[in-house]
Amino acid sequence: MTVEKFEDLNVWQNAREVVKKIYLITNKQEFKSDSGLKSQIQRAAVSIMTNIAEGFERETNKDFANFLNYSKGSAGEVRSLLYIAKDLNYITEKQFIDLKELSITIIKQLYTFKKYLRNKKIS
């Protein structure tokens, strides 16, 4: 499969799914009173997706790899914030596990993709 646009990337598609799920759970009553955590987890989730897109549109593999690194950091941030949401009973155990596993999948995909870009001739 040839990747012609960032929307073709499985990792971007997974990041999009995380954003959707985060927005759905943070719009529930449990999150409404905690605007700080709600905002932080939403921004971190959006950052995963947007950094993949922005990096893809850069001119060099080196730039792309840097943006994938930012995205990986944001995925870790989401994972950490999920623990807070779970500890405060804002999300169910099932929601926590689902989002945590998807975040870990994205982190692994980003690591593999960065490794691939570094092994290519970087311009």
Image (cartoon, rainbow, N blue to C red):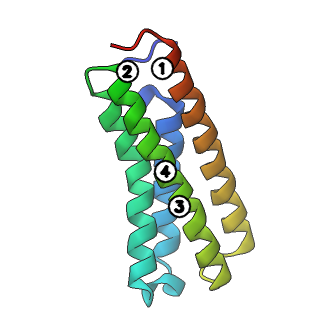
Residue named by callout 1: 117
Compare marks 4 and 1 and give the one earlier in the sequence: 4
| Quarter the C terminus occupies | top left
Mark 4 touches mark 1? (CB < 8 Å): no
Secondary structure under badge 1? helix
Mark 2 touches mark 1? (CB < 8 Å): yes
| Nearer-the-camera pick, 111 or 29 | 111
Q: Residue at x 44, y 26 (%)?
A: 8
Horizontal side of residue 9 vs 5, given as left or right = right
Secondary structure under badge 2? helix
- Can you give x and y, in whole percent of width and height, for residue 80 in the image? 59, 65
Disc 2 or disc 3, which is closer to the eye?
A: 2
Q: Amino acid at mark 1?
A: Leu
Q: Amino acid at mark 4?
A: Gly
Label 2 vs label 1: CA separation? 6 Å
Q: Amino acid at mark 3?
A: Val
Alpha-carbon neighbours of circle 2 within 10 Å: few (<14), some, or many (≥20)? some
Q: Residue at x 38, y 73 (%)?
A: 39
Q: Amino acid at mark 2?
A: Asn
Horizontal side of residue 80 vs 9, given as left or right = right
- Which label was assigned to residue 73? 4
Secondary structure under badge 4? helix
Mark 3 touches mark 4? (CB < 8 Å): no
Compare marks 1 and 3 and give the one earlier in the sequence: 3
Residue named by callout 2: 61
- Can you give x and y, in whole percent of width and height, for residue 20 in the image? 47, 57
Q: Residue at x 54, y 19 (%)?
A: 116
Label 2 vs label 3: CA separation? 25 Å
Compare marks 3 and 4 and give the one earlier in the sequence: 4
Residue named by callout 3: 78
Compare marks 4 and 2 and give the one earlier in the sequence: 2
